[in-house]
Image (tube, coloured by chain):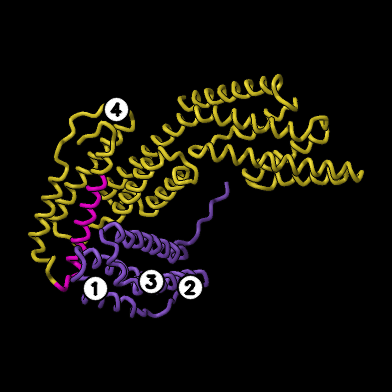
Chain colours: A yellow, B purple
Amino acid sequence: MVDTLKAIYRNILFAVLIAIVMYVDMHYSYARQGWMTITVLAMTQFTVGTWIRQTLFRAMTLIAVLLTAHICVELSQLFNFPVLFWLTLILGLLSLLIFEVTFASVAMMFVMCLLFTNFMPWADLQDQVLDVFIASAIMLILSSIVTLITIRKAFINLMLQYIDYLIVLVDNIHAPHAKSLSTLIALNNSLQHNTKWVFSLGFSPGLRAGFRFYLLEIERAIELLLNLNQERCDPELVACFNESMFVNKQMLQILRDFFRGHHLTNTPLDWMQDIIQFEHAMKKSLPNVQHSVYIHYHELAMIRLFKNAKDLRLIFLQLLSALPNSLR
Amino acid sequence: MPKKRYANPNQLEPYVNYKKRCDSIYLLLLDCGQLRYRISDHTTFRFCQAEIEQIRQFLLSLLQDMNHCFTNDQMQVQENDDAHLTNLEGIYEMVLQVVMEEPLNFLLFIDDIRQLSKLCLIKDG
């Protein structure tokens, strides 16, 4: 229901945007051929994050396509050779069908430019290019208003997905057969695929540092959680480890509550007590391990478990302390 | 309604084993990558730069061999040549253990690499 309403809202916004640009196109454009509307149609596929780069890129592509179309039409008219026009039109239509979305949209622009230039040749190329530039500037301003809201929502959604995944991983440590390793790895890969926009070139410098900090720290937490192995460890250490995982889950729930917009209350002040106890238990089980030259693989497994649990806690503490109105 | 045909579980077994092994290798590689976070002073890597580079090459060739053997239905990979790993262990015992603040972190890395090379060399496909 919420998704449907969002889709309706997005479509209404899109229609209003087109109407504004069409009005400007009819009354204030240079060429009066609808080039502004074409530009807006080419640019309304908002990509989260890098809107300035994407808008400029699309404007440049449109101008390049326009020039190519003009050259094709001019050549076919100059040499009285209309086959060239029809050939390029068919090639454009074919590439529209064959290629993927990015190239298909370029092909679509090319076909439109070709048709407009051939059948409405009364305007100058200069006017058409000016119209494309004006429409691009309008889109840049409008999309800056729209996409800033989208970026915030997209990041919150991404964080909620990641936190849910981390909670699944923590639960999976207690019940290792709940989900297979392959499923967990596949989930991680699909989540990583969604974060591309944060790391892409041209993403807002003001938001970049904070977003990337959260994502990189969470990535490391996932790597650690996937590698926590309690086999070959003393029962006392395993109990301490389970206790630390319980606290980790509490921390993750606080993070999740924050990103869901809930008010944060009743948070304990000391998040390291269980890790200190874990360390004491470690020292009791493996005295003088720091100074010994040869370490048995059984001891190494316990050291690994402790180090991973400690690193994990430090990451979660960093994530919590980085929240605004933090819990310090 | 025609019955669905499933592959024979016995035929699938090598593929399932191979997938499990790939998952384990992936996780071990992730664990190896933890070294860069665990060692605060990165200049210590200069002591063993050549050995780590050799190990990288060795692991790459192992993984390529493993992939090649599986795709060609030959369930054998090259014999273990862990001279590079022995060199790294030697440097660890002679130099790194003394120089580094937290030598145990490096020991964990060596253990990961050893497990990784063992896992790549299993001959059950």
Give the magenta part as a residue range. Answer: A293-316
- How far across and down, in percent of the image, does residue A157 sit? 40, 35
Q: CA distance from mark 4 to mark 3?
A: 49 Å
* Residue under the image location 49 percent in, 46 percent down: A201
* Residue under the image location 45 percent in, 43 percent down: A194
Q: CA distance from mark 1 to mark 3?
A: 15 Å
- Please tell me which residue lies in front, A213 or A123: A123
The residue carrying mark 4 is A262
Kindly report which numbered mark, 2 or 4, lies closer to the viewer in this rendering.
4
Q: CA distance from mark 1 to mark 4?
A: 50 Å
Q: Do the residues at pointers 2 and 3 share their chain?
A: yes
Kindly report which numbered mark, 2 or 3, lies closer to the viewer in this rendering.
3
The residue carrying mark 3 is B53
Amino acid at dot 2:
Cys
Amino acid at dot 3:
Glu
Snapshot quadrant of residue A284: bottom left
For the stretch drawn in magenta, the main secondary structure is: helix
- How far across and down, in percent of the image, does residue A23 sit? 67, 19
Q: CA distance from mark 1 to mark 2?
A: 33 Å
Question: Mark 1 belongs to which subunit?
Answer: B
Badge 3, how many Cα within 10 Å: few under 14, some, many 20+? few
Kindly report which numbered mark, 4 or 3, lies closer to the viewer in this rendering.
3
- How far across and down, in percent of the image, does residue A25 sit? 69, 23
The tag earlier along the polypeptide, 2 or 3, is 3
The residue carrying mark 1 is B92
